[in-house]
Image (cartoon, rainbow, N blue to C red):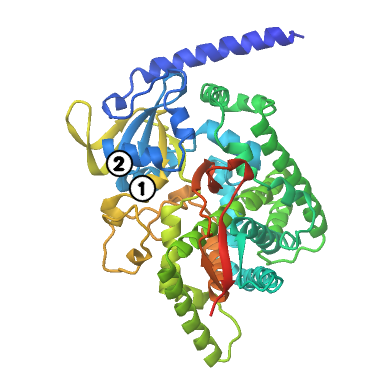
Amino acid sequence: MPSLSALALAFGIFLTAAFISRRVKEKRRFIKDVRGPPSSSWLLGNELEIRHQSDVGDVDFQWMREYGTVWRTQTSYGGDNLYIADPKALQYVLQTSGYHYPKNIAENFMNKMMMGRGLVSAIGDAHRRQKKVMNPVFSSAQLRSFVPSFRQTAAKLSHKWTELLQAGDGTTEVELNVSSWLSRTTLDIICNAAFNHHVGALDNEENELTKIFDNFFTKSSLYPPARDLLYKGLWKYVPANLLDLLEYMPTRQDALRRKFLKLAKRIAKELVDEKMCTVEKGSKDALSVLVRSNQSEDPKAQMDEDEMLSQMATLILAGHETTASTMSWLLYELARHPEDQQTMREEIAAFRRTIQARGGNDFGTSDFEAMPFTNAVIKETLRLYPIAHNFNRYADRDDVIPLAQPVVLKTGKVASEIHINKGQAITVSVVGYNRVPSVWGDDAHEWNPRRFLDTKEARQTSVGVYANLATFSAGIRACIGWRFAVFEMQAVIVELVEKFELKLPVVALDIQRAPAQSLVPLDRARPQDGAQMPLRVSLAH
């Protein structure tokens, strides 16, 4: 049996050969004339300034102003990356030719370490099979059945805040870190709705899930050191079937991701074992659908046990902090714009009177969907604060990407399309596209929910699955749970705005749009404290 040092040497030689081969191909790149920021380091390229930007979007907005909606950056080890924020380019890459732009292999491997072999990391036929199995869980009819459960959890949060106000020393308001409260709320919601599993996060019940989610994204993803970027920069030179050998490298961030996946799978296995004998035919909650797929004899409708458990880990992670962070930013903007908060509250009150007049007790999905300003506020929050602010793809063939807005090349030529080589790395700038003035207006960088009330305004190119936003991605890899997230936000936000008035704290914090894989609100002076969104809360009148 060869020694460890011999194996390491062989792997090093293989990696060097793969690196040289890839660099030779990159020298023949088509995008050499696309303009972009200079790089001061061949080793790191622009990676450090992208991953260490102070606020999400800082570099995207700067480079969009300088180069247009398409630009080129340098990756580690001298590689090239094409950034796109152009609406027609996004439509082409994500929708028209979506199957020819698969996920970046290295990024997908990191997702697999964190969420296993679920929908987020599955590719090709495995992705198509899993999506077909999971579609019934996220059908509009099934999601509507979850709304009463969403409302119950929202009412519980409201009750907790009311108790804090009543327990005060005669004061009429209390300052709360709403980010923490919303994180616990969404954890209870996803576990209850998807798996009928009681976590008790709002009741501060001690459990392993709430502990591991304490500042999970800031600990696992915020400001990775240069050595980590260099290490992961090598992944693109490693064949996909050998990447699994790197799974247990002892980095602190990767160890935390593995710890979450191990815990989530253990909890999922316990729930599955309980469900195996009691699953009802036709039931469409996530747990029942997954158990039936595991028992299915049809290979096109089957998931093995690891896929099933990975799916549950994916739902817990992807359906929890993402929505909590979005709602935190929404309440922050309402506190900054009390006139919009009041408009929203008046709209909710009007619908409440209508419900009472017809003899109803609570809002239903049809009521939520009929609230124009409330939904405009949700859309504007998703536009300004996209939780997944960018994501990566690569071209599986030579291609030509069309542009809605021509860009000036280094040669001075104006290009309305970009020629790319097979293997070209591409980053979709979600935060950039969501602020393109030609799509969203001259005030694209400003808070203005009323832009979504102007139904006469024509959009040039259809991009996303919701409100023309790129926030939930688009095409074949669009977020399968986007309706779940919207219904959940409607249920929780309507409850909070109806019952409470929200104001900025007396001593204002400098809230940072932290690039921690998801867009996390942090106190710039104390990022080690984790997600922070302190607001003054009082009963609404």
Mark 2 to mark 1: distance in Å?
A: 8 Å
Q: Nearer the viewer, residue 100 or 385?
A: 385
Q: Nearer the viewer, residue 245 or 158?
A: 158
Neighbor class of circle 2 (other Cα within 10 Å; few <14, some 14-19, many 20+) is many
Q: Earlier in the sequence, mark 2 or mark 1?
A: 2
Compared across the picture, whether 88 is left or right of 496 comes to left
Amino acid type, label 2:
Thr
Q: Do the residues bearing badges 2 and 1 touch, measured as CB atoms within 8 Å?
A: yes
Q: Considering only vertical position in the picture, is 9 above or below 481?
A: above
Image coordinates of residue 252 in percent, x first then y, are 67, 31
Q: Which residue is mark 1?
A: 433
Compared across the picture, whether 458 is left or right of 257 comes to left
Image coordinates of residue 428 in percent, x first then y, are 41, 41
Q: Residue at x 62, y 46 (%)?
A: 530
Compared across the picture, whether 145 is left or right of 355 comes to right
Image coordinates of residue 154 in percent, x first then y, are 63, 69
Residue 55 in sight from this viewpoint: yes
Among the 4 quarters of the image, the one containing residue 528: top right
Image coordinates of residue 415 in percent, x first then y, are 21, 35
Compared across the picture, whether 141 is left or right of 340 comes to right
Q: Which mark is residue 69?
A: 2
Q: Residue at x 69, y 26 (%)?
A: 250
Q: Residue at x 29, y 54 (%)?
A: 439
